[in-house]
Amino acid sequence: MKIIDQFLSYFESQDHTIVPSSALVPEGDNSVLLTTAGMQQFKPYYLGKPSPFGNRVASVQKCVRVDDIEEVGDETHNTFFEMLGNFSFNYPDGEGSYFKEEAIRYGYEFIAEALGMQIDYVTIFAGDEKTPRDDESYQIWQKLAAEKGIDLEIREYGREDNFWGPTGSEGPCGPTTEIYVNDVEIWNIVFNQFYAKPDKSLVELDQQGVDTGGGFERILTQAEGVRSVYDSSLFSSIMTQIREDLPDNTEETYRMILDHTRAGLFLIADGVVPSNKEQGYVLRRLIRKVLSVMAKDPAGREKYLAVSQMIRELYSDRYPELETSREVYETLITEEYALFADALKRGMKHANKMLKKKRVPKISGEEAFILSSTYGLSPEVMKLNGLEFDQEEFSEKKDEHKQVSRAGAAKKFGGHGLILDNGELKAANEEELKIVTRLHSVTHLLNKALREVLGDGVEQKGSDITADRTRFDFSFDRKMTDEEKKQVEDLVNQYIQQGLDVSITEMNLEEAKKTGALYLANRNYPERVHVYAFGEVSKELCGGPHVENTKEIGTFRIKKEEAVARGTRRIRGVIE
């Protein structure tokens, strides 16, 4: 992947710290389900928190976007992609920070000189009644063109094209400038210059920032002069194999298979498990859309895993988590294959009964929603299996269902929103926050006890904590015996009664790992981390919150131990 090597080399030469990609599940950011942009892991540093990487950084960020999932299969849409980006924080006071002039120069030199691509034109913000024209960027581009001895067309576009933010009623925002090659935008520089107040008025930010993004797949497509990334040198051999394995399908179907398999591979490597909610639902939807084609073939499962392996080999040098999660991946795909094949068979049987009563081969939107909610057949899967239905009515029924679900959630939480929801811990009020804090602390002790009773091969796979219980997933290849469960429960309560003080130490990631602290193998941590120690018993990388002493926890009880996937078990526990 020469372009990525050139990107990293160029920005290293410009004194940028190269920061590894963060995980696809954002850590400590519940504003989105998945990582959708390179700047997400750096959001705190735009808001004033000191950056442990310095004030100029660059990254190649893995991203997943599913807003236009139904368009995947054409020549331009992808769910998974890699975003090349360079970033600057805390301008002008931050050491090494930069703003418009340097950002524009870096973008031009990387695209035109490092990659040798011919720029068609660039764009700036034209200004409107709310915000002035970006004269500074216009002048910088003119000056750069004169210095390089080139003719450069500068186009001026409005707010929709060349102004970013704010993301809510107020917040940072600013003009953008973009670089176009072959009439395709391949480089977008956002200048966080203003703060938008609730009345829409703008004030200049004291600390300004640069957020640049360029999609690797889009740059590759233009660099090689092909119609889509599926036709590029990156994917040509994989596409050939998919066509050979699954003849008599459309090109759109082949592209969808590659795209969705790639996205699913990366999501599972980052710890996502197929389910009916949140990230798990996104993953299940991606997998099942592929299975809607693969499951028709007697060797469909094997062909699915073969495509997965080709993609894994393509990326595993840069993303070793793809290889380390291989066994988990194959187990989950096998289980989803069996579940889906059964659901599809029953769902299509029900659909055929519906069609027998009709004069035209089309079901209603309400009937389609029944198939979706009862059998788990998504709109894409129904369409791929030849079912026609009223899309508008289907959407209406889905919205009605969501409203009923929201009403139930509001009732459950007494009409209040959540004051804490970081993906792992959820609390609706201060009282619940105290409970989940105790439950969060007990998971550390549970992790230690499991390793003591079952062996050091046990690894945490995830946790989910509400005021009602803690749910802890861990690697183990069989059901625990009643005696083992009792040993674990007793050991946790022994730790609690020891009255262990909980201490927090901030240190560099590599230093933390050398201390023997436990951490999640499939999670990307920042360079500076917090290590929580429970006396001499337990030490883990974590973000809190926790009790100050274990005696605050109470008494721990295991309510249930069950399988989640092959090789992964789950304990549900409570405190009394």
Image (cartoon, rainbow, N blue to C red):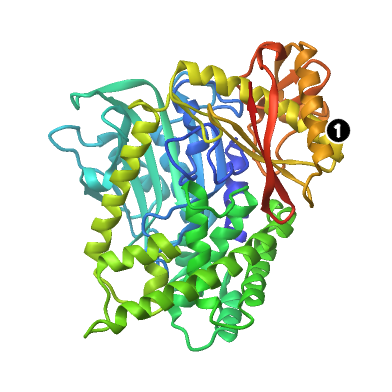
* Residue 338 point in image, percent of width and height: 60, 69
Describe residue 118's horizontal placement relative to residue 552 as left or right: left
Describe residue 421's horizontal placement relative to residue 267 as left or right: left
Name the amino acid, label 1.
Glu
Q: In the picture, residue 211 is in which quadrant?
A: top left
Quadrant where the N terminus sits is bottom right
Describe residue 301's horizontal placement relative to residue 94 as left or right: right
Residue neighbourhood size for the residue with mark 1, other residues' Cα within 10 Å, grouped as few (<14), some (14–19), many (≥20):
some
Q: Between 255 and 273, which is closer to the camera in this rendering?
A: 273
Query: Which residue is the extreme one toward the left?
Result: 129
Residue 511 visible in the picture: no
* Residue 130 point in image, percent of width and height: 16, 32
Q: Is residue 35 above or below residue 76?
A: above
Q: Residue at x 44, y 42 (%)?
A: 212
Q: Residue at x 50, y 66 (%)?
A: 288
Residue 521 visible in the picture: yes
In the rendered image, which residue does mark 1 sit on? 452
Q: In the picture, residue 516 is in which quadrant?
A: top right
Mark 1 element type: helix
Query: Which residue is the extreme one toward the front?
Result: 482
* Residue 198 point in image, percent of width and height: 22, 24
* Residue 89 point in image, percent of width and height: 48, 28
Q: Between 326 and 128, which is closer to the camera in this rendering?
A: 326
Q: Between 309 and 213, which is closer to the camera in this rendering?
A: 309
Q: Is residue 276 above or below residue 508?
A: below
Q: Between 179 and 289, which is closer to the camera in this rendering?
A: 289
Q: Residue at x 71, y 15 (%)?
A: 550
Q: In the picture, residue 364 is in which quadrant?
A: bottom left
Quadrant where the C terminus sits is top right
